[in-house]
Image (cartoon, coloured by chain):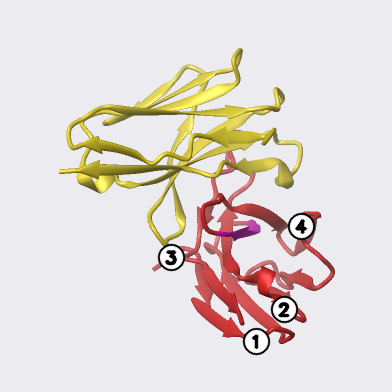
Chain colours: A yellow, B red
Amino acid sequence: RKEVEQDPGPFNVPEGATVAFNCTYSNSASQSFFWYRQDCRKEPKLLMSVYSSGNEDGRFTAQLNRASQYISLLIRDSKLSDSATYLCVVDTYSSASKIIFGSGTRLSIRP
Amino acid sequence: DTGVSQDPRHKITKRGQNVTFRCDPISEHNRLYWYRQTLGQGPEFLTYFQNEAQLEKSRLLSDRFSAERPKGSFSTLEIQRTEQGDSAMYLCASSLYPSGGRTDTQYFGPGTRLTVL
């Protein structure tokens, strides 16, 4: 089993729709969680950190469920510009090699 | 531009040749990471530095790979005797640790795309 798993997608949704993805992690000692966005052939860019209480940034909401060991990302009122791959990142603080990136979920927004 | 920069952006080489990549982190960042990313996968950790000290290396990093950060600023990643399986995007990231909180937010450079023929 991979340490961080994501549904690879692609998720293909119409503009204006709400879309959500989950990411599961296997190490219960994980401490920090992030969502990164990666456009085709570009570098990953931090979208948001994920806090225990959940957090929102505009149309984006991130949630953490420690009991079930998953994090989620919700995108409301999706825009064409949201089309990208979304990478889940989990950090245990134990070592740098334990900063684990998921394989990403591809999202495509259609007009 | 004060972000992370990498050079070259693209490198095509023949199998068996040596290649070296450079990364310039954000100037006040003390941590520097190297990752490798292949198509359809997330970045895989290779190694990282805190200032000039190389603190950890992945088991993925064979003895053909070496990284340095001699003055705690820029870093180089060298691959000796390249193999076709080394073809990938090599990403560098930097962060400021500790940052006042427990999160160690990494900022990525644009990557060096290596193609080994």
Left or right of A78, for residue B61: right
Q: Position of residue A52 (x, y in %)?
A: 52, 19
Distance, label 3 to label 1, CA atoms, is 33 Å
Q: Position of residue B85 (x, y in %)?
A: 68, 69
Q: Please name the residue shown 56% across and 49% down the image.
A: B42
Q: Position of residue A3 (x, y in %)?
A: 67, 35
Q: Which residues are magenta?
A: B31-38
> Picture quarter containing residue A20?
top left
Distance, label 3 to label 2, CA atoms, is 31 Å
Between disc 3 and disc 2, whose residue precedes? 3
SS at mark 3?
A: loop
Residue B60, labelled with which disc?
A: 4
Determine crowd level at label 3: few under 14, some 14-19, many 20+ residues with C-alpha closer than 10 A: few
Between disc 3 and disc 4, whose residue precedes? 3
Q: Nearer the viewer, mark 3 or mark 2?
A: 2
Left or right of A52, for residue B59: right
Q: Chain of mark 2?
A: B
Q: Is residue B39 above or below residue A77?
A: below
Callout 1 amino acid: Lys
Q: Please name the residue shown 55% across and 81% down the image.
A: B11
Q: Which residue is most to the top?
A: A67
Judging by the rendered image, the residue that carries numbered circle 3 is B2
Callout 3 amino acid: Thr
Judging by the rendered image, the residue that carries numbered circle 1 is B14
Determine crowd level at label 2: few under 14, some 14-19, many 20+ residues with C-alpha closer than 10 A: many
Q: Nearer the viewer, mark 4 or mark 1?
A: 1
Q: Chain of mark 3?
A: B
